[in-house]
Image (tube, rainbow, N blue to C red):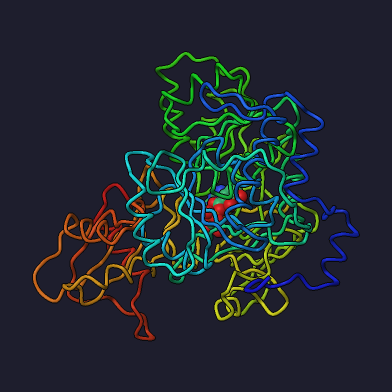
Amino acid sequence: MEGCQPWPDEIAAFYREKDCWRGETFGQMLRVRAEKHGNKIAITDGGKQVSYETLDKRVDQLASGFQKLGFKKEDRVVIQIPNTVEFFEVCFALFRLGVLPVFALPSHRYSEIQYFCELTEAKAYIMPENFSGYHYHEMAKTIQRESSTLEHIITLGASEELEQLADLYLEEEYIQPNVYSNDIAFLQLSGGSTGLSKLIPRTHDEYIYSLRKSNEICRMDENSVYLAVLAIAHNYPLSSPGVLGSLYAGARIVLATRSSPDEAFPIIEKEKVTIVALVPPIAIIWLEALKTRSNDFTSLEIIQVGGAHFNAEIAKRMQQAFGCKLQQVYGMAEGLVNYTRLDDPEETIINTQGRPMSPYDEIRVVDEEDREVELGEVGELLTRGPYTIRGYYKAEQHNAKAFTLNGFYRTGDLVSLDEAGNIVVEGRIKDQINRGGEKIAAEEMEDHIASHPNVFDVAVVSMPDQFLGERSCAFVIPYEGMITKVEMKDFLIKRGIADFKIPDRVEIVDTFPQTSFGKVSKKALREMITKKLSPTYK
Ligand code: J2J
């Protein structure tokens, strides 16, 4: 497909020969599950229960409606759908037509959605009427007015002006195009480090392989009940093993839209949840909340924690407090996912981020000259394998830097390996802030902030935070006087930027410290703000 790097033939042949890629597609996978599991419940969404059979049928009805709108194979559709049944109906309807969903997050706003629509030349944008206090319709209309490709704006809610998803479930037959397992199934978002998020093309073959391996490691089967509290468009709750792994296993998904103990704990008890995926800040809240609750957690077998650094002391307490297995997950939307195994020694589960899920994952830990470092030493992690991309979507120039000549993805993460091959994430070289699992590309925010009329120069860095691990701090050199955090926030909200990216702190300075090459020293800026925040952080 245009803009996507094809897998080299001999490598694709190798992964097929090794039975990693089995020729399955998502559309067909759901059909097979529906035939097998019939009226077994696939998704519980509040009071709503949807069986495998019903899901499959609704997906066909929607595919018929989408085809009638003119959606064709290889079209792109930006979807911004919270944790609801519609997420699955829309995704699988698009999969069956060979149309690519682009997975925006509910927290994205004008600037992100507009960019995804423009970059992918999206034919449609599907969003809720409102979610978490935000109304999406006005933003959608503005984006459509400015776009030359967006033919359809489809709301999950009610509207007289916009098309309504509810009207698109048609009983009519539709023509199912040939969708092949090596076709691109969707575009996932990268956390981003240089400029705006890059888009990640994933094929049916490789993504389904990652689900199968995840299921094996997490022992997912028909009896599993997966609770989704994180936004399921994100790669981690989507695929590690996440909601798609659950469907692959014939398990049941329970959807929640909030991760608070008030919402999640009673659900775990009532629905007899067996596995849940968390990011570290939520794990901390759950651990604290346990002190004052008496919910029954006996069904819970695995709590996964991933997406950002997880403190070892808290990991230890977590495992004891919930009386179930803790699993650390270190993954990336670009591919490679590492898990601690359920039968690993406690030391490994607490102190490491696990090891690659596939025997065909290749990892190298290298120094600045791409030379492998000694075992136990820290270096950048490079990886390639049966479910790690070979290039971003429409990003040739960036790809030349983000991948080695022989196809290894440069993760930008600093790691060390132990003797058993477990990875410990030690830091990163990419210019990104990991705010409790939500990724912020420093450069993207710098570009936004630099457009403020009173900003002469800006540098965005991470600062330590006990709860989120990191927060973002913008060092600003103004033309004159001051810029307050409130002023900055108002300015950025008006530009339409996801809330989590807005700097948590603004520091006004006269100059930036420089490296010996005359570049802004972000290391020195991080040290400055860390020192200022002491005595909490030494
Ligand atoms: C430290 N840093 C981590 C961890 C990710 C499973 C789990 C997570 C993601 C994800 C994912 C970390 N400790 N346990 O896609 O399928 C940081 C690293 C990594 C980046 C990727 C999955 N787990 N990270 O978080 O694409 O810096 O995917 O390169 O959002 O998050 O972010 P993302």
Residue drawn 48% across the image and 55% down it: 125
Q: Going by the picture, which residue comes out furthest to the right? A: 17
Q: Quadrant of the N terminus?
A: bottom right
| Side (left or right) of 477 relative to 247 | left
Can you name the residue that lies furthest to the bottom here?
517
Residue 330 visible in the snapshot: no
Residue extending farthest left: 481
**Nearer-the-camera pick, 278 or 416:** 278
Q: Residue at x 55, y 24 (%)?
A: 48
- Residue in front for this viewpoint, 253 or 373: 253
Residue 316, compared with residue 419, is above or below; it is above
In the image, residue 412 above or below residue 264: below
Is residue 502 toward the left or the right of residue 286 in the image?
A: left
Whether residue 100 appears in this view of the structure is: yes
Identify whether 301 is placed above or below 529.
above
Q: Measured from the top left, where is residue 212 in percent x and y?
A: 76, 44
Point 55% across, 22% down: residue = 268
Answer left or right for 467 relative to 98: left
